[in-house]
Amino acid sequence: NAGVTQTPKFRVLKTGQSMTLLCAQDMNHEYMYWYRQDPGMGLRLIHYSVGEGTTAKGEVPDGYNVSRLKKQNFLLGLESAAPSQTSVYFCASSYRRGPRGYIQYFGAGTRLSVL
Amino acid sequence: GIQVEQSPPDLILQEGANSTLRCNFSDSVNNLQWFHQNPWGQLINLFYIPSGTKQNGRLSATTVATERYSLLYISSSQTTDSGVYFCAEPYSGGGADGLTFGKGTHLIIQP
């Protein structure tokens, strides 16, 4: 049981380049989330999805797009990377049913540097 | 949205010591979670504790929802307890959204 898997683990981009981060979960969870973590900060919510085919904006959505074409996958895209997007990106998922449905399970993170 | 304040921001202890970490919230607490981020960056959910007290080994947590705070207790600290501890509450206070995190308590356990 892999849980939440993020690819890639590390990436270096030049300003203006594009890329897609992939998150996959094998727990049949309904809800999925993308966060970013900057030095000395807690995680901040970028976008989230409450089910296949749905997405919504979080706290810091600008410069990012997402898609949830399959229940198990949640993609985060950067169309034109900027140095301000240098961060560690975490994906999470939750079942969202039952008394413990709010518990979120996190991937190992993707460390992105934009030069 | 809800504001989350954690204290202390940094804590350095000797192995075997006990510690108490605190989270204060600006709004009602409904689905509070505590996480540990280890030195390799992995986030592990420690407790889901919207109210009351729970214990898991040397760790325990208490949430007093009516007073908008939560405490995490670590007893007999070990070096493997080092890392950053976060508390978090759903973004819109119990809705369908993601979590709002505090800035964390950076804990260092020295042998």
Image (cartoon, coloured by chain):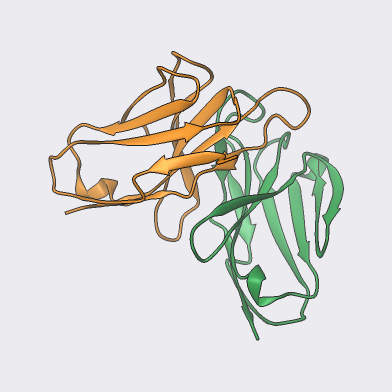
Relative vertical location of residue A23 with respect to residue A38 in this rendering, above or below: above
Horizontal side of B81 relative to A38 (left or right) equals: right
Q: Please state the horizontal and vertical placement of residue A98, each as a whole percent of the image.
A: 76, 24
Relative vertical location of residue B37 with respect to residue A24 in this rendering, above or below: below
Q: Please state the horizontal and vertical placement of residue A87, each as a whole percent of the image.
A: 34, 51
Relative vertical location of residue A115 with respect to residue B48 in this rendering, above or below: below
Q: Please state the horizontal and vertical placement of residue B14, each as a whole percent of the image.
A: 69, 84
> Does residue A18 appear anywhere in the picture?
yes
Q: Residue at x 77, y 43 (%)?
A: B49
Horizontal side of B58 relative to B45 (left or right) equals: right
Horizontal side of A33 relative to A69 (left or right) equals: right
Quadrant of residue B73 within the rendered picture: bottom right
Relative vertical location of residue A93 with respect to residue A14 in this rendering, above or below: above
Looking at the rendered image, the quarter that the N terminus of chain B falls into is top right
Q: According to the rendering, which colour does chain B have?
A: green
Q: Nearer the viewer, residue B102 or B73?
A: B73
Q: Residue at x 76, y 56 (%)?
A: B71
Outermost residue to the front: A1
Outermost residue to the top: A53
Looking at the rendered image, the quarter that the C terminus of chain B falls into is bottom right
User: Which chain is in orange here?
Assistant: A
Q: Residue at x 71, y 62 (%)?
A: B21
Q: Residue at x 79, y 75 (%)?
A: B76
> Does residue A63 appear anywhere in the picture?
no
Q: How many marks?
A: 0
Quadrant of residue B36 within the rendered picture: bottom right
Q: Please state the horizontal and vertical placement of residue B91, each as a whole percent of the image.
A: 57, 33
Quadrant of residue A16 within the rendered picture: top left
Q: Nearer the viewer, residue B14 or B95?
A: B14
